[in-house]
Amino acid sequence: MTKDDHRPNRRPARRGMFILPSLFTAGSIGAGFYAIMQSLQGSALEPHHFDYAALAIGLAVPFDGLDGRIARLTNTTSEFGKELDSLADVITFGVAPSILAYSWGFRALPPTMDPLLRSKLMHAGAVVSFLFLICGACRLARFNTSADAQPKNPGRPDRKYFVGMPIPAAAGVIAASVHSFLGTPVFSATVAIIWAFLIALVGFLMVSTWRFWSGKEINLTDRHPFQLLALIGVFVAVVVLFSRELLFLIALGYMFSGVLARAAYSWSLRHRKHPRPAGSPSNHPGAGDFPGAA
């Protein structure tokens, strides 16, 4: 039997493998659609719908990460898959969290609030929620068109970074915040203003050129698979038991990691541009203690 005899038998299996990453992408789209439907049904009397929407968005995050990894592992990457993944991200991590952010933080404000203030907060909430969506779409467009984008504040050379906050992480901030309250909607003007500021900040971080750690240098396939499975199992169990607190801390921690990295880089850049003189008093602790000291 020659090598050519084996080729027809391999083609059907390879064609079937192309479907596998798309199934995870379709699952992400389904989670986004479910989150939109739950956000529209949520209210102060039925807050669990908001919580279900947040959980659906959170569940879509690993789906988004798995489709690309599976495509690379099975060598089934394609232009169709890339375009489908981008459209899925717009729906699940753009449209769904923006609707959830508005419905939970502004539309469900109590009717007993001052009508004029409530109306202004709802209009402001609609604007910032729309800006979140636009920033997310722009973030995806930049990611798809940039061949090798580099952040303005480069980090360690052995690490890989995203340029701007990735849209799944931005959606995770919205979802984790809602879930931390178990879907109970915003009840005061002060909290609504803070919520609007947070949405605007996340939108800005997506279109910024600040660095966010990608974790792509981590290899999960060649070292101690059984130990890795055990660690993943423990992590999943802890997340399930303490999902409200842990997911909120992880989401905010990742968001502020980019802010702190940018602040640290700006601080170090200023010190490099304006170094202290060699004979400054700070370099000689005893200098300046006595008149005429050098």
Image (cartoon, grey):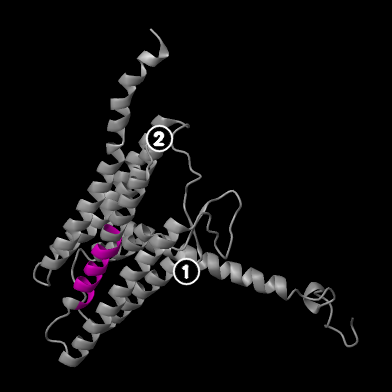
279 to 33, vertically: above or below: below
Which residue ends up furthest to the top in the rendered image?
A: 1
Q: Quadrant of the N terminus?
A: top left
Whether the magenta-drawn stretch holds residue 103 is answered as yes
Q: Is residue 267 above or below residue 219?
A: below
**Up/down of 91 relative to 111, above or below:** above
Name the residue located 44 percent from the left edge and 34 percent from the top edge. 221
Q: Secondary structure at mark 2?
A: loop
Residue type indicated by callout 2: Asn
**Outermost residue toward the front in this view:** 4
- Residue at 65% x, 70% y is 269
Give the prevailing secondary structure in the magenta stretch: helix
Q: Quadrant of residue 32?
A: bottom left
Circle 1 residues within 10 Å: few <14, some 14–19, many ≥20: some
Picture disc at residue 75: 2
- Label 2, label 1: how far apart the Cα atoms are: 32 Å
